[in-house]
Amino acid sequence: MRLGPVAPADAPGEARIVCPIREEGKILGYLLVANRSATRPIDPGERELLEMLSDYLAVAIRNSRLYGEVAETKQYLEQLILSAGDAIISVDGEGQVRSWNPAADRIFGFTAAQAVGQPFANLLPPEPYRSAHGSLSRENPVRAFDASAKRADGRSLNLAVTLSSLPGRNGGTDGMLAIIRDMTAQREIEAQMHQSERLTSLGQMAGGIAHDFNNLLQAILGYAQLMARSPGNVDVVRRGIDVIEKAATSGAETVRRMQKFARIRQQDEPFVPMDVNQVVRDSLAITRPRWEEKKIKGGVPLQLELELGPVPVVMGRPAELNEVITNLVLNAIDAMPRGGTLRIRTRLADYRHAAITVADTGMGMTDEVRKRVFDPYFTTKGEEGTGLGLSVSHSIVERHGGDLRVDSRPGEGTTFTITLPIGMKPTSESTTGSHPGGERTGRILLVDNDPQVLSILGEMLKDAGHHVLPVPSGPEALRVFIPSGFDLIITNVGMPDMSGWDVAERLRASDPQVPVIFITGWGLQEEDQARSRRLGISALLFKPVSPQDLHRTVQVALAARTR
């Protein structure tokens, strides 16, 4: 028996036969059978069997080719999965990891041997994974979400996750496929660019802010000198004290706005009831120097129309909403290089939503620009812009359960509309800051490298009846500290020889129970919050500190120590 292009010679009564091997009308070859052991002719029955055999051979050849194609495809797909830069993880119907590619090794720090058979849910935080997984269905077989997770070595990860249902043979599902991209580096770059954009905006407003501070310092210095020359003039002293206090409060408020805009966070900000109108006022206050600089120095006629309506409270983060409105105002100013009118309005959109509109009479946008205005990195400002301001603003509004829309036409200006769900005030006022059980006094170790700050804080504490030991540095604090010898430590954070963090850690090692209060003029970055909680810092005060805030915070710390 042999295959080959042999010409048929199968006349009746011959001792050989040639049967074509066909597939869909095409000849793949021939089956040649010759009765060599005898000269007996091949009978019709044998001929029929041989023709059937040629049909079977055609099927076998086709299957062999298909098997080769399947094997090649399988090898190709396996190579794709092995070479992919994203983690590709298959999960069985029980939620266990079934396969794990090398990219998953690199991202999560687990080998395939460690991961296969383990619950996939352990890799991601419960939410939003539980919600995305629960919503997979035949109608919605794909779900995508962002998540924060931890590598095996504890390093934080920012991940983009896509879950897809795997169809089973019975029409149901047979587990799912997870494709996970490590966005950590990209998110860090975006955060740096975002911070750079905010600081650039602050730099553009620096001249106006310096002008405001010089005015405040002029008032403080002028009245301080008048009071020094006429200490017996009660009217001058009383008026001077009032002006100095107001000037210092105004300066502190300007710094607070700058810190919020630059995202130097003063606390872990949960959603709280916020006054939308006050957020608008704060945003206008921080952008006013930029506004006035264009009006006065550039001679650009800019007008502001402000209409703040009665709006119920909204649940959210005031600092984030302040960033959104500040960004919209700065964009509006840039969109009116020859002058125009900025209109800001707050109102009740419906019985469930508040609305903020920021409209300008500037250049406007084409449809192409308007459709892409919220895309990351899209900018019309050239090298001056990062293209992240409106993208981040849109994300912030979405996190608040709201919506940010834009309406614009070339030459007719632009209107941004923010809608936010109305929140409810807490049913009872927070008792934070109260100190039941009467006034408490204690032995306080006070640490600050600035002599003036050390002096005034010490006077405030002594005036409240506390026993205070002021020291000018961290090393000096360690030298005089006696375990159980103090009821409270108050330390500045930013000191040259030894920071407040180091002081707290060293003193905590000697006396784990002593409360510690931080005072800072810098604010805390997000990564400092976890460190503060780990050290058990009782409270954080921001300079300038009023006697009332200092007293209330000290009372709470002392009350907690006696419980």
Image (cartoon, rainbow, N blue to C red):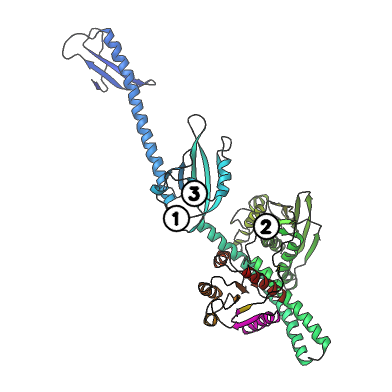
Provide residue 444's location: percent of width, then percent of height: 62, 78
Res 198 → quadrant: bottom right
- Asked whether the residues under the numbered discs 1 and 3 touch, taking CB atoms below 8 Å apart as contact, a structural biologist would say no
Q: Is residue 521 magenta?
A: no
Separation of residues labelled 3 and 2 (CA atoms): 28 Å
Where disc 1 sits, the SS reads loop
Q: Quadrant of the N terminus?
A: top left
Check disc 1 and give the amino acid type: Ala
Residue topped by disc 2: 271
Asked if residue 205 shows in the view, the reply is no
Q: What segment carries the magenta color?
A: 445-470
Placement of 309 over or under 23, stated as above or below: below
Residue topped by disc 1: 152
For residue 440, side relative to residue 479 (left or right) = right
Check disc 3 and give the amino acid type: Asn
Q: Quadrant of the C terminus?
A: bottom right
Q: Given the current orientation, which residue lies at the most extreme right position? A: 235
Check disc 2 and give the amino acid type: Phe
